[in-house]
Amino acid sequence: MPSDSTSKPKIAISACLMGAEVRYNGGHKESRLCSRTLTDYFEFIPVCPEVAIGLGIPREPIRLVGNPKDPLALGTVHPDLNVTQPLADYGQQMAGELGDICGYIFMQKSPSCGLDRVKVYHANGSPVDGGGRGIYAQAFCARHPDLPVEEDGRLNDPVLRENFLTRVFVYAAWQQLLQQGLSRRALTDFHSRYKYLLMAHHPLQYKTLGNLLGNMGKRDPEELGPRYFSELMAALKKCATRRTHTNVLQHLSGYFKQAISAEDKQEVQHVIAQYRHGIVPLVVPLTLLKHHLRQHPDPYVAQQVYLQPHPENLSLRNAI
């Protein structure tokens, strides 16, 4: 399981997504996925930077103006309303205060909170090609480059949803490891448990990080650990595919080839092929492999986070 801790991982979230009526028009953008489904598994910390810096409800909308890489947040009616610096300062402040979160879900398209493709305008009101990032989100994420972050709309995609929540649980497990103390043994054991998850997301980084730890020698784990974790989180951002999942399933099935009958082996290969061709979801071959693992226990396979990187009741692998 992702964590031995009974406490829920904390996720910061744009307050409007939890149903808080804090938007410029006095409304909200409640995400039922977040406010109803995921609350059983995560502790959400709602944040509205625009209200926090003193803008009222309702209020004049703001928009991004100028260079998409370094825009200003200005009032749409009164362009002399410039809240760029207050939003950036609040992003820095919250990056310091929210040191124990394991993820952040931002409101998409928001000039304060949007992560990507936020509309940016010329001073004359015409849109700039491409898009930018919300001022608050930019300042916050700059301080936490390894933190799993996502926009609410993208969580409607089953693959992106599973990817984000997997990363949240990995982040939480790493924070727990840091609390217990980072030794060479602890770092090696951590990597051992996450090897097949990493292989599914980024086969090349699977080899690179294995070599990094294999050549650890007498290097200080306190120095090596942060580099390892940054590279791990970057690798996990890449979504696993049916091809890479199939590769991992084949590797795992190899542990049972001496233990199960020829008929059972044939069934395993048949189900993995069905998954590869899109006939069944990932949960089907995984369930069969876990069945054989119960019948023929293998300590190395049993410890693999890949088999259950998030609570089973979330059913995240039923749709991928």
Image: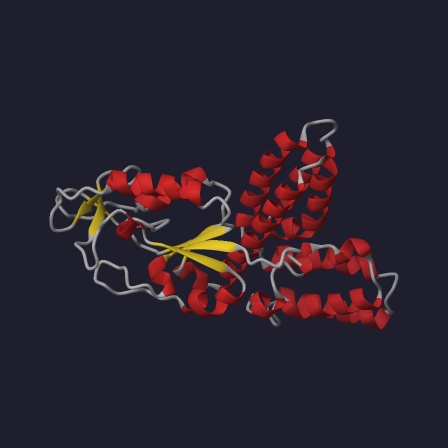
User: How far across and down, in percent of the image, does residue 264 sit?
Assistant: 81, 71
User: How far across and down, in percent of the image, does residue 316 sit?
Assistant: 56, 66
Total marks shown come to: 0
In the rendered image, which quarter contains the N terminus? bottom right
Q: Name the quadrant containing residue 183.
A: top right
Residue that protrudes farthest toward the top in the picture: 218
In the rendered image, which quarter contains the C terminus? bottom right
Indicate left or right for 169 with 72 as reference: right
Residue in the picture at 46% in, 41% down: 144
Front-most of 48 and 137?
48
Front-most of 43 and 119?
43
Front-most of 102 and 98?
98
In the rendered image, is residue 205 in sight?
no
In the rendered image, is residue 254 in sight?
yes
Residue in the picture at 79% in, 69% down: 266
Indicate left or right for 249 with 40 as reference: right
Q: How is the image coloured?
A: secondary structure
Indicate left or right for 78 with 8 as reference: left
Image height of 296 relative to 163, above or below: below
Residue in the picture at 31% in, 40% down: 88
Image height of 178 relative to 6, above or below: above
Image height of 168 relative to 210, above or below: below
Indicate left or right for 250 with 10 as reference: right
User: How far across and down, in percent of the image, does residue 140 sit?
Assistant: 39, 42
User: How far across and down, in percent of the image, does residue 204 sit?
Assistant: 63, 43
Residue in the picture at 16% in, 54% down: 60
